């Protein structure tokens, strides 16, 4: 699984980062604001930071939080 976390260090960014770390999710962090904006423009993404890309799927903060929750739930079943 490939997870890339795009962050500008905002409160939502920090919450998502902590949730992913607590869940044991390995991720690459992109925290250079210019790089974050460049990627968002490249993707046509306009929901702001943070966002993650999981195996090619872009998720805004709300979707990412739900994904983390589902990931944790799936791990407990194993």
Image (tube, rainbow, N blue to C red):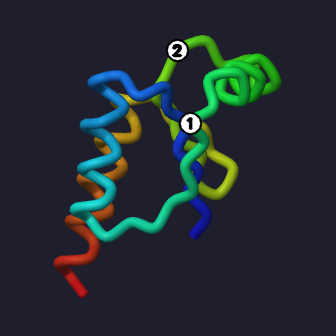
Q: In the rendered view, does 5 fall on the left or right side of 19?
A: right
Which is more N-terminal, label 1 or label 2? 1
Q: Position of residue 29 (x, y in %)?
A: 55, 49
Q: Residue furthest top?
A: 46
Q: Looking at the figure, which quarter contains the N terminus? A: bottom right
Q: Position of residue 71 (x, y in %)?
A: 32, 63
Per the image, label 2 sits on a secondary structure element best described as loop
Residue 74 vertical position relative to residue 4 in the rendered view, above or below: below
Tag of residue 31? 1
Q: Residue at x 62, y 23 (%)?
A: 33
Residue nearest the observer in this picture, 13 or 63:
13
Q: Residue furthest front?
A: 32
At numbered mark 1, what does the secondary structure look like: helix, strand or loop?
loop
Q: CA distance from mark 2 to mark 1?
A: 16 Å
In the picture as drawn, the residue positioned furthest to the bottom comes out as: 78
Percent of width and height locating residue 77: 20, 81
Q: What is the crowding at mark 2: few (fewer than 14 residues within 10 Å), some, or many (at least 20)?
A: few
């Amino acid at each position: 699984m490939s997870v890339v976390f795009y962050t500008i260090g905002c409160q939502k960014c920090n919450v998502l980062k902590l949730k992913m770390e607590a869940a044991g999710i390995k991720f690459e962090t992109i925290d250079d604001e210019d790089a974050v904006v460049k990627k968002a423009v490249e993707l046509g993404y306009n929901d702001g930071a943070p966002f993650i890309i999981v195996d090619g799927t872009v998720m805004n903060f709300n979707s990412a939080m739900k994904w983390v929750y589902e990931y944790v739930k799936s791990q407990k079943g194993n």
